[in-house]
Image: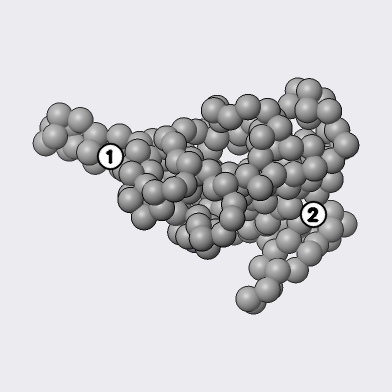
Amino acid sequence: MKILDIGSATGYPFIDYLYDKKIDIYGIDVSEKLINECRKKYPNSNLSVSSAENLSFESNFFDMIYCFHTTWHFEDFFKSIKEMFRAIKDDGKIIIDVMNADNEEMKKVFFIKCIKDIIKKIIYYPFSFFKYGRLKNPVIHYEKPVSVAKFNRFLYDRKIIFKMFVFNEDNLKEINTNEKINNHSRLIYIIQKENILSQEVIN
């Protein structure tokens, strides 16, 4: 079994949990520093510096793709999802979580985040260039939620099988599209590309 962890960072918790099991673990992250830290802890894992928008793997390669606490850092969410569909096997599963841009609380959170980003660019970036001659942390972090309604339509149009879950205390609760999805700020998707030609999915 081949499993990809997108946004693997230092390897915790997913690579850490699977490392001693008989599974081919792959991990990618845009941060070279985090990948190097992960290599030190899990030397037998297949790790690389890469983005979700341009996966360097052949089509129909993975049995499962896992991506948690990462989708809101994607530069292009839907391009990343298409890349996952390309790399996953026809009977494989993709497990991701998303921040819901249609949720009122999330709109407030990311409005404040945008204001902080503007202040950071005005104050921190010039200071960093003045002191170090460069950005001390050159990795660009995109933080933006996605419209769940738009994402669901994207999946429906491609006849993709998926289930949605939310956290209910310490457990996961499955919800359906007839419920008030926008009451939830964060949703977990289990997506299966089943009996669909790859070309139909990625277009």
Residue 117 seen in the figure: no
On the image, the x and y values in percent for residue 139 come to 35, 36
Which residue type carries mark 1? Asn
- Rendered image: mark on residue 83: none
From the top left corner, tell me how far across and down residue 53 is, in percent. 56, 30
Q: Is mark 2 on a helix, strand or loop?
A: strand
Q: Residues within 10 Å of mark 1 (few under 14, many from 20)?
A: few
Secondary structure under tag 1 reads loop
Q: Which of 98 and 31 is in front in this view?
A: 31
Q: Is residue 5 above or below residue 80?
A: below
Instruction: Pinpoint residue 28: horizontal percent, then vertical percent.
Output: 48, 40
- Residue lying at 36% horizontally and 55% vertically, measured from the top left: 41
Mark 1 and mark 2: Cα distance apart in space? 37 Å
Residue 137: assigned label:
1
Q: Is residue 169 something that shows in the picture? A: yes
* Residue 129: percent from left, percent from top: 18, 31
Instruction: Give the camera-side residue of 174 and 15.
Output: 15
Residue 163 is labelled as 2
